[in-house]
């Protein structure tokens, strides 16, 4: 976050109470309020908002990364669905592609809002206790989830005594059930009432090990827990620190915290690091001209990216030695103040701008180059970002609607890749190219492709059962070179990416890695050959679909209906599972879509096609699907966005499959 506004920047027309609160808040805000414009009033109004927690199994009202193509700027989009008129959101943590928790303020009330359908509906849980008899406001400023169950929220409360005196106290809430219930935890004396303590950020490297940071009357504060947040202990902090805004822990031992120290007319950015779990913290050298550091993300104990501002523009710092030295990276001139950063690997990071017009920057090479992404004009400022994978990022902040008081969440459609029979891979949107078999000798043509859960790799499968792994996809075995009763026609990956199934045209199933064998149609009579396979969301079952639309369910896969025995204009060519409903879609060669316990979002049935449809692929819990034709044409339905295609372009071999 930006440093607290300097007192002299407020003019008499602005509310004296708001100005006092602005100076007192430990969560710093803008320093550029020159007069009481609408923007200034919005900035001041945000300070009086109380707490909000948003739990979403997709990411509520979120900004989404949807790069259109390699030659155009990516576009972040507001996640469709109902979003209440709530306050600005300040932080977010996404432990999976489906679950996220965002925190913020909302008009002197604080509560949880939970969604289980990707942000279409929100259920509030009600206020928590009031910490004493005096009126107070509550602010949630940081959240970290070690997994989908164990999360910690930090913030502070403002206590107002009868004579008008205000004091501050840090707040900590923990959950072990994904936010269904929250427990208030005791805070150390360093951030309790009497010391004007506040907590601004938290990082949990495991369900038990967390570090939280903030400030008090005596300076910067760092506290730690090793039991999941029940007991927190003070850490020794370098004496020169005034305010710590957030922290990132790559392991329980290795953490980096960032913040700033104000001076008479300005401020200086601060970075401290520990390699022993917080027993000792060392102040690190920060390049000159950095006024404050608001965000940090460490993908390994050595590799971290920190972001902030020089006072006149955004700052990005990188280290490859655990924070001992930091290098300034090039930042687009239009960026004002970078608030938060999230790195899923040494290469892939996203940072967001909390200036008067929100912005997002993306790197895929460890910070050597940063690309500016398009952000909707409704995103007045972006303050937090969390990436579960390189293709699943969620940003939060404030919207220009509701006079700047509305929270905004934007969640990223993932892009898609097409696979050709010769092994060529064509990637669009924010789908990455990790290699292919294009131009290489194959014993048999490629017939299918499956992605790893983080989108950072994929497998291609050939007609003879050969497997080809790229990116972070590991090779767990194949049917290549082994006798088959019928050719392989498809592949499905397990949800954790540690295994996959191959399916043959006769219904035979071949399981590798942690993929379990739940049964097959091998050796059984079929009215039509099998053409595809899809895994259940938990990987404990799978469906096979036949060319006549027959469905065969195994494991915990439910049978929700089929087209078997029904009239079809064209044969079925593929199947995809809906991770939200647990149902499935099948697609026909003419683009007809048949939905079973899954929403029908449209089709190409009855419409002219240049080439037959060969596959259907959904985005992860994004309310849409892409249809893929053999000439590389792509057709989008629901919330799926069009990011480019191979339609009308020369191909060495026809397209046979796709992944979203």
Image (cartoon, helix red, strand yellow):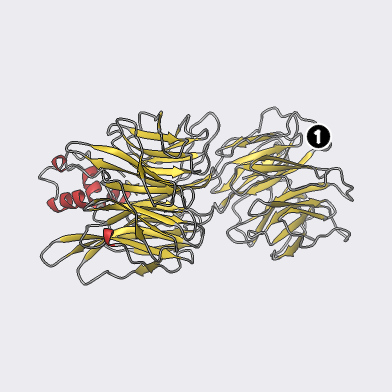
Q: Is residue 216 above or below residue 122?
A: above
Q: Quadrant of residue 353?
A: top left
Q: Quadrant of residue 566?
A: bottom right
Q: Residues within 10 Å of mark 1 (few under 14, many from 20)?
A: some
Picture residue at 12% right of the left edge, 62% below the top: 164
Residue projecting furthest to the bottom: 133
The quadrant of the image that shows the C terminus is top right
In-image side of 250 versus 608 (left or right) = left
Q: Is residue 244 above or below residue 645?
A: below
Please name whichever residue, 231 or 489, is drawn nearer the observer in this view of the structure. Answer: 231
Please name whichever residue, 450 or 553, is drawn nearer the observer in this view of the structure. Answer: 450
Q: Which residue is mark 1?
A: 442
Please name whichever residue, 116 or 527, is drawn nearer the observer in this view of the structure. Answer: 116
The quadrant of the image that shows the N terminus is top left
> Which x, y percent locates residue 27?
28, 50
> Which x, y percent locates residue 167?
19, 60
> Which x, y percent locates residue 597?
63, 62
Q: Does residue 600 appear in the picture of this structure?
A: yes
In-image side of 577 versus 222 (left or right) = right
Q: Does residue 608 appear in the picture of this structure?
A: no
Picture residue at 85% right of the left edge, 54% below the top: 506
Picture residue at 70% right of the left edge, 63% below the top: 557
């Amino acid at each position: 976050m930006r440093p607290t506004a300097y007192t002299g920047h407020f003019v008499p027309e602005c509310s004296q109470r708001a100005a006092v609160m602005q100076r007192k808040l430990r969560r710093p805000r803008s320093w550029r309020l020159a007069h009481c414009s609408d923007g200034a009033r919005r900035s001041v109004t945000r300070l009086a908002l109380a707490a909000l927690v948003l739990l979403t199994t997709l990411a509520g009202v979120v900004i989404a990364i949807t790069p259109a193509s390699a030659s155009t700027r990516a576009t972040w989009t507001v996640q469709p669905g109902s979003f209440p008129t709530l306050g600005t959101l300040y932080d977010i943590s996404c432990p999976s592609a489906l679950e996220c928790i965002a925190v913020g303020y909302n008009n002197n009330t604080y509560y949880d809002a939970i969604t289980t359908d990707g942000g279409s509906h929100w259920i509030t849980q009600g206020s928590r206790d009031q910490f004493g008899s005096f009126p107070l406001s509550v602010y949630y400023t940081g959240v970290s989830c070690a997994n989908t169950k164990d999360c910690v929220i930090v913030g502070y409360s403002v206590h107002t005594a009868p004579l008008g005196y205000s004091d501050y106290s840090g707040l900590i809430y923990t959950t072990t059930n994904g936010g269904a219930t929250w427990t208030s935890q005791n805070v150390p004396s360093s951030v309790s009432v009497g010391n004007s303590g506040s907590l601004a950020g938290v990082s949990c490297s495991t369900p038990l090990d967390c570090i939280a940071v903030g400030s008090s009357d005596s300076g910067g504060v760092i506290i730690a827990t090793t039991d999941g947040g029940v007991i927190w202990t003070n850490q020794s902090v370098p004496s020169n620190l005034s305010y710590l805004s957030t922290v990132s822990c790559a392991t329980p031992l290795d953490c980096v915290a960032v913040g700033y120290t104000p001076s008479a007319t300005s401020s200086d950015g601060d970075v401290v690091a520990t390699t022993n779990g917080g027993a000792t913290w060392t102040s690190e050298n920060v390049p000159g001209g950095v006024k404050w550091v608001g965000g940090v993300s460490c993908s390994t104990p050595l590799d971290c990216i920190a972001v902030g501002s020089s006072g006149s523009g955004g700052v990005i710092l990188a280290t490859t030695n655990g924070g001992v030295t930091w290098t300034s990276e090039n930042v687009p001139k239009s960026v004002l103040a970078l608030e938060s950063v999230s790195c899923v690997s040494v290469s892939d990071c996203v940072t967001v701008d909390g200036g008067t017009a929100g912005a997002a920057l993306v790197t895929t090479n460890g910070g050597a180059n940063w690309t500016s992404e398009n952000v909707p004009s409704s995103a007045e400022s972006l303050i937090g970002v969390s990436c579960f994978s390189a293709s699943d990022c969620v940003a939060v902040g404030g919207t220009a609607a509701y006079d700047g008081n509305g929270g905004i969440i934007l969640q990223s459609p993932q892009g898609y890749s097409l696979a050709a029979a010769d092994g060529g891979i064509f990637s669009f949107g924010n789908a990455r190219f990790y290699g292919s078999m294009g131009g290489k000798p194959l014993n048999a043509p490629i017939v299918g492709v499956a992605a790893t859960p983080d989108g950072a790799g994929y497998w291609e499968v050939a007609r003879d059962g050969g497997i080809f792994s790229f990116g972070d996809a590991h090779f767990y075995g194949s049917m290549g070179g082994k006798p088959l009763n019928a050719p392989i026609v498809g592949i499905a990956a397990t949800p954790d990416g540690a295994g996959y199934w191959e399916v043959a045209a006769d219904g035979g199933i071949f399981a590798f890695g942690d993929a379990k064998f739940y049964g097959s149609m091998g050796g059984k009579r079929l009215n039509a050959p099998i053409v595809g396979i899809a895994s259940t969301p938990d990987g404990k079952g799978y469906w096979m679909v036949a060319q006549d639309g027959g469905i065969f369910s195994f494991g915990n896969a439910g049978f929700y209906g089929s087209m078997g025995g029904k009239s079809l204009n064209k044969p079925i060519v593929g199947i995809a599972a809906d991770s939200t409903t647990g149902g499935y879609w099948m697609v026909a060669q003419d683009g007809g879509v048949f939905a079973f316990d899954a929403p029908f979002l449209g089709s190409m049935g009855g419409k002219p096609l240049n080439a037959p449809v060969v596959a259907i692929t959904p985005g992860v819990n994004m309310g849409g699907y892409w249809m893929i034709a053999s000439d590389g044409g792509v057709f989008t339905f629901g919330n799926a966005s069009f990011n480019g295609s191979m339609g009308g372009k020369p191909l060495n071999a026809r397209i046979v499959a796709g992944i979203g």
